[in-house]
Image (cartoon, coloured by chain):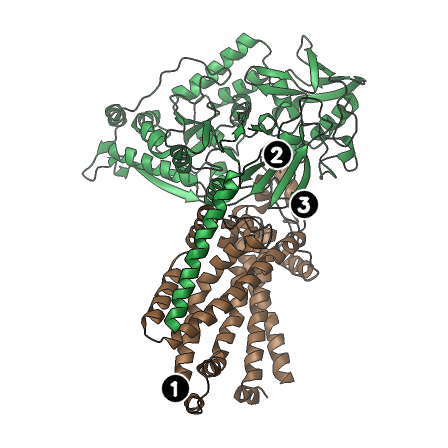
Amino acid sequence: MKQYLTKRILGTFPLLILVTFMAFVLINLRTSDPAEIALRVNQITPTEEVVQQMREELGLDDPFLIRYKNWILNSLQGDFGNSYVNKKPVLEELQQAIPPTLQLAGVTLLLIVIFSISIGIICSIFENRWQDRFLRGFIFVLAAMPSFWIGLLLMWYFSVYLGWLPTSGMNGPASIILPALTLSLTFLSTYVRLIRNNMIQNASENFILYAKLRGLRQSTVVWKIFANSIQSSLTAFGMSIPRLIAGTVIVENIFAWPGIGRLCVKAIFNSDYPVIQAYILMMAVLFIVCNLLVDICIVMIDPRLRREAK
Amino acid sequence: MKTKWLAGLIALLILVAGCGQQAKQTTQASGEKKNELVFASTKDIRDINPHLTGGELAAQNMVFESLVVNTPEGVQPKLAESWDISEDGLTYTFKLRENVVFNDGEPFNAEAVKQNIDAVVANYEKNAWLNLVQVIGSTAVVDEHTFVLTLKNPYYPTLEELGLTRPFRMISPNSFIDGTTANGVNGYAGTGPYQLAEHKDNQYALFTINEHYWGDKPKIGQVRWKVMPDHQTILLALQNGEIDLIFGADGDMLDANAFTSLQEQGKYITKISPPSGSRSILLNSKREFTQDKLIREALQYAINKQTIATGILNGTEQIADVLMSKSTPYADIELTARPYDVAKAEALLDQAGWVKSEDGYRYQEGKKLSLMLSYNSDNAQEKTIGESMQNDLKAIGVELELLGEEKQAYFDRQKSGEFDLQYSLSWGLPYDPQTYVSTWRVPSHGDYQAQAGLEKKEWLDQTIGEVLVEQDEAARADKYEQIFSYVHEEAVYLPLTYSVVKAIHSEALHGVTFNVSQYEIPFELMYFE
């Protein structure tokens, strides 16, 4: 097991280098001069002297590989450079933007768990009856709607029409409900289907038949089916966490949520390269780490894989 | 049994929804006089250091003041009570207002003015976009309340440019870092009606009344600047009563559709400023097809501006016959408009030797008359206008290719001059006309590139240089007339509309007016009733 772990952990490094290198290459392939961009975002007319001054300031005159090496080494020490737009350290910007996104992702995850489990169970109990069809149809429609549209509809209904919740911004616990709900709806359909189908499959297993024969209460039987159906969902769930964090972009923009997604969109619009690079690095790490953790969990849960790993 | 659950759940939801609506009605009924104005903006105020260009102008304008102010009646006193200009136009002596303090308690005096102006000039590279920065020779303190500014050469818009929202606004010397503002400031102490009390990056900024303010204090106690990146969210928030005011130019905060739909609802007050800037299309005189003046002229007659003004901009902007609106200084001159006239456009193209072929397009020596309009793809409105023009030009046998590019690529193209047609937005008052024409001489601007093929481009640049230092009012007007007449005659600008500032606010809010500059918002004059 130890050997497997070291192998997997060491394997992530080349992957990280590859991802960051690709990101660095792609950004540098652009024909636009980053020095000019850095001037334009502050509405300074880029004359030759100012551009040259800025090039020196940003260290753009170094060869490509040296710049990559410097960037990686500095990034490892938490120095992602300074934003072109406001000259603040990128790390500071990230530190400000990450907590709101984690809050949003956390509440969204909770909503996904609550809704997908309850709807999944209801669907499996009422398999192919109208309740099942109605709920699945409803979820299907929600999954097909783009999140900016759902977001605006929810905002109109709950804020403008009912007046229950603030439309946007991050002030108080009430303001997280709408963005989290919007975000959770896009993920719901996957889990509802997973839970429902697994439960239906497990319902015909022998141990369930025995449980029924023993005359156990229906709720106990349902619980037994559920407990045995949750594993595959858990795996999918693990990979949803980075997707959730990376997928907050649109929702954060609509709900004026000051998180990492909005930071990234703003950076893209302003061609704020240091911020974009830091964002890509962070997301790459997040995906790779989550993937690793999920793989390790699966190995630990499944005895057959555990033996193979040895 | 389970169906009962579901039915119960649905019933509960309906019940709760009903209560919610009632709750909202009661809160709306018990409205009291507000002391906070909530303004929504798609952008954060960022760093409002008045000597740099990184912050939002409207926010800088709330906190910092200049020696003079631009008003519809011309330049008026602000922190300077009066001034004298020497005969040769080189020396400006300002008598400063007494008993003015910065909101950190530091007295405002000639020494503070000198430090501020010196700091701006010292950061020459970043401030040289403004001509005045290039011509300031020296600054001197005569006594506590007398300050002298000496220029290297006469420059007629000196006072106008001193009154701009940046960079010549006064910040307390205590806010300087190591005697300069070029690398940031450690506070935002100004003399303006408001002070920045709180700022959460990308969320909101809170401005409160500056208790030390020398003039009439604003009636509204605090202004909350809320950042909402999405336009639709701003509209819903307005309808929900969360915000009181939307204010902005060029579709920045509000597109024309949203503006009209709110206007029609009748629940809000909508206002439009007098024409501010000029929206036109550059016709590049250096490119293969558009270097022919006949083609440039034909394009002028072919565009149906009425469709653009009413169909796309929903009547919020005025049709422009000439580049600068008559209300712009020195632009009230007689120029022959080129009205929408398809027959005339076709005749001009015939004259230029372009023959219509079976496919409806014009050809010459096997070459199709095909032009490219480059625009910034962030701007949806520009795309729609482009489509309307595409349609108009097709009617006269000219193909128009629309090339939307991401912002920086668009600028790169602008700088290289690789476009047939591109949008040009003037800076708006009070920058127009001097700062706008001044940028025509800078190669990184599209205007320069589009004019580069003109026979008298050198003369044009020289005349612009001369007009800026011309001391004699009549001679100056004459030079401006020559400049505007020449670019009009050469048809390098296809004037579309004059842009305006739009404001929408709740009925309770009063006193919403416009400043001369489209980027400023006069919060200090607003009040609730």
Mark 1 belongs to which amino acid?
Ser
Mark 1 neighbour class, 10 Å CA radius: few under 14, some 14 to 19, many 20 or more:
few
Give a yes or no on whether discs 1 and 3 share a subunit. Answer: yes
What residue lies at 45% left-to-right and 82% top-to-bottom?
A225
Disc 3 marks a residue whose amino acid type is: Glu
Query: What residue do we see at 61% from left, 83% from top?
Result: A4
Residue A204: which disc? Answer: 1
> For the N terminus of chain B, which image quadrant?
bottom left
Circle 3 Cα neighbour tier, 10 Å, few/some/many (<14 / 14–19 / ≥20): few
Q: Which of marks 1 and 3 is nearer the N terminus?
A: 3
Number of residues whose C-alpha sits closer than 10 Å to that of mark 2, classed few (under 14), some (14–19) or many (20 or more): few
Give x and y (percent) for residue B53: 62, 35
Q: Which mark is residue B35?
A: 2
Are dots 3 and 2 in contact, CB under 8 Å? no
- Give the quarter of the figure containing the C terminus of chain B: top right
User: In the rendered image, what is the letter of the chain coloured green?
Assistant: B
Query: What chain does mark 2 sit on?
Result: B
**Mark in the foreground, 1 or 3:** 1
B287 relative to B320, above or below: below
Residue B319 in sight from this viewpoint: yes
Question: In the image shown, does B474 or B511 lie closer to the viewer?
Answer: B511
Q: Estimate the spatial distance between the alpha carbons at disc 1 and disc 3, rounded to whole Å.
A: 69 Å
Quadrant of res A102 = bottom right
Q: Which residue is drawn at 54% across and 71% down?
A: A238
**The disc numbered 3 marks a residue on which chain?**
A
Residue A122, image quadrant: bottom left
Question: Which disc number belongs to residue A57?
Answer: 3
B285 in relation to A17, above or below: above
Please state the horizontal and vertical placement of residue A211, each as a whole percent of the image. 45, 89
Q: The brown chain is which one?
A: A
